[in-house]
Image (cartoon, helix red, strand yellow):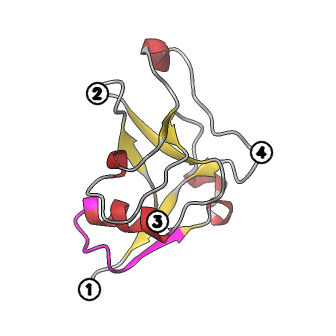
Amino acid sequence: MGVVHVKSSTLPGMSGMVCDETGLWSQNEAKVVCRSAGYSGNLAWPVDPADMPDDVLPAQHYVIKNVKCVGTEQTINQCPHTDMCMAMEFLEKTFRCPDQYSGKAAAVVCGRN
């Protein structure tokens, strides 16, 4: 089980977590993440961020939110999403995940098959 980290598509060299702002992180997103990590994607489960211990979810930069994958994409950045930072302000400020829904980092479990 792990928190999903991605490279920013708008700021080269920057990376951070995926915000599950809507609480809709699903099997499709988990498949894409597992496939991009070298697993087949056939055994992939989304993890409800509410089930993650707080110490696993450090307060750090979030780079994307509102991810909605079909499940066939090769990387999470190919899925429709919203960038949370668009400029070098990323270096000066922490982009937090809003708490209005689940408000935590997206996470997955990948299995070998």
Q: Alpha carbon of mark 3 to alpha carbon of mark 4: how far?
A: 21 Å
Q: Alpha carbon of mark 1 to alpha carbon of mark 4: how far?
A: 37 Å
The tag earlier along the polypeptide, 3 or 2, is 2
Q: Secondary structure at mark 2?
A: loop
The tag earlier along the polypeptide, 2 or 1, is 2
Q: Alpha carbon of mark 3 to alpha carbon of mark 2: how far?
A: 23 Å
Residue type (three-letter) at the residue carrying disc 4: Gln
Q: Which residues are magenta?
A: 36-46
The tag earlier along the polypeptide, 1 or 4, is 4
User: Of 89 and 75, which appears nearest the observer?
Assistant: 75
Structural crowding at the residue carrying mark 2, measured as other residues with C-alpha within 10 Å and reported as few (<14), some (14–19) or many (≥20): few
User: Of 29 and 45, which appears nearest the observer?
Assistant: 29
Main secondary structure type of the part rendered in magenta: loop
Callout 3–callout 1 Cβ contact below 8 Å: no
The residue mark sitting in front, 4 or 2, is 4
The tag earlier along the polypeptide, 3 or 1, is 3
The tag earlier along the polypeptide, 3 or 4, is 4
- Tag shown at residue 113: 1
> Which residue lies at the image location 44% right of the left edge and 67% below the top edge?
28
Q: Alpha carbon of mark 3 to alpha carbon of mark 1: how far?
A: 16 Å
- In this rendering, is residue 97 above or below 38? above
Pointer 4: what residue? 100
Pointer 2: what residue? 13
Q: Secondary structure at mark 4?
A: loop
Task: Give the left or right position of residue 97, taking residue 84 as reference.
Answer: right
Q: Secondary structure at mark 1?
A: loop
- In this rendering, is residue 97 above or below 76? above
Where residue 6 appears, x then y in whole percent? Answer: 37, 44
Query: Is residue 87 one of those drawn in magenta?
Result: no
Residue type (three-letter) at the residue carrying disc 3: Val
Pointer 3: what residue? 108
Total marks placed: 4
